[in-house]
Image (cartoon, rainbow, N blue to C red):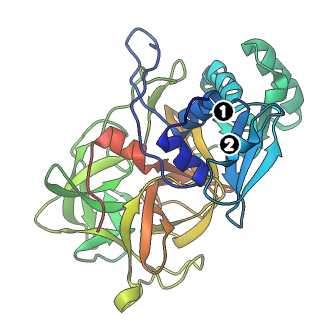
Amino acid sequence: MKKLSSVGRTLLAGLCLAAIPMTSSAQLEQPAEEFRTIDHEYRDMAKAYPGFGGLFHDEEGVVNVYVTGDANRAEIGRLADGEVNFLPAEFAWDELFEVRERISDIMAEPGTVYLDIDEKRNRVVVGISGIGKQAVARKASIAARYGVSEKALELREIEPIQMHVSLRDSRRPVPGGMQITYGNFLCTLGFSVVRNGVNGFITNSHCSTAQGGNQNTSYGQGSNQTIAQEQVDPTYRSNLANCPAGRRCRLSDSLFASYNGNANGQKGRIARPTCRNCNNLTIGNNGRKRFNITSEGSVGVGTTVHKVGRTTGWTSGTKTDSCVTINALSGNVDTGLTLICQDLANYNSNGGDSGSPVFRRRGGAKVQLVGINWGGNAQTAVYSPISQVKQELGNFDALR
């Protein structure tokens, strides 16, 4: 039997995912830009181990693996580091992957919020706003129109995903999670980095004069003293692989801004409020005033993740979905922009928290950076995975 890649084995063990280049077919008139996601890794696992239908972690950290009836459970089980619970699957992951690819243009239809292969449901899930009692008929229509199995689909009523833009003190050197201003707007500074020898920070692309493309947006802090300027902010484009027809896409809502002489960044540090999930914005003292970024990577569905932002402070919740394609709204207006392969979690996030660092705790003050928060709705928050931020902005050092 074909051996699985080391990345695939790591995924099954519930550890980190590194970005790997991938060859994809052309889209529109120009060659589609290439990228690789966790969904591609799971697809390759299903090809190497037929019957593999996806995996997720439960609250106790046990790896739950979906397998079809003809799957070799012994072979798949040997890939995991620890206890494995097998669940009956109706579809192998490569089958779900094909369904998701075939209906990808549904993202261009009014009311579509997101598209996902749901690890916990063993289904392709389409999030639609305002669908109500029409869900059953709509699912049958989608299946017939795209020529896919109706049983492989699940339609989910969900509010549109809003990009959060909405108010605090300045701190030197600047740690992640602090408020920044641009024009009359507020966002959160994600984390300070060194990129190509330049000191700066990462925040959201929509936290700028115009989302996508460099407009040299100036950023302030505290009394609006300018501390940095936008430097790298890729444009949204239609020739990205899997970008729905009629829309422009990116892999992350991110940009890089370089510090000027009024500030310097505290690389590898995130401000730490005194309590979690309590709406307290006060930063702790001494050793409890910061988190230390000691690693970065991806985490599995079911893992607890945290974020620190200028509006709701330090909040945490469970990663609920991975690699979800999302149409982004701003003030209930469709931007025409789509974010590919984003992660969802149920931590609290609100206006002004855009740009917040998202991380997993690794003991004490140590944390693993997993992404950058950019939006959500009343039920869920959305963040761009750190691997995709680096694919778009180029490599940078965010570690302590």
| Residue displayed at 27% across by 49% down | 256
Compared with residue 61, is residue 46 higher up or lower down, i.e. above or below? above
Amino acid type, callout 2: Ile
In this view, which residue lies farthest toward the left? 261
Determine whether the residue tagged by mark 1 lies in a helix, strand or loop: loop
Q: Residues within 10 Å of mark 1 (few under 14, many from 20)?
A: many
Q: Which mark is residue 49?
A: 1
**Image location of residue 38, percent across then percent down:** 54, 40
Compared with residue 9, is residue 44 higher up or lower down, i.e. above or below? above
**Image location of residue 170, percent across then percent down:** 29, 75
Q: Residues within 10 Å of mark 2 (few under 14, many from 20)?
A: many
Determine whether the residue tagged by mark 2 lies in a helix, strand or loop: helix
Q: Are marks 1 and 2 in contact (CB under 8 Å)?
A: yes
Q: Is residue 322 left or right of residue 173?
A: right
**Image location of residue 204, percent across then percent down:** 39, 50
Query: In front: 225, or 283?
Result: 283
Q: Is residue 66 left or right of residue 228?
A: right
**Image location of residue 95, percent across then percent down:** 70, 25
Which tag, 1 or 2, sits closer to the chain's start? 1
Q: Which mark is residue 386?
A: none
Q: Is residue 329 visible?
A: no
Amino acid type, callout 1: Tyr
Q: Is residue 386 visible?
A: yes
Q: CA distance from mark 1 to mark 2?
A: 7 Å
| Quadrant for the N terminus in the image | top right
| Residue displayed at 88% across by 24% down | 137
Q: Which residue was labeled with disc 2?
A: 76
| Residue displayed at 62% across by 22% down | 101
| Residue displayed at 54% across by 18% down | 245
| Quadrant for the C terminus in the image | bottom left
The quarter holding residue 225 reads bottom left
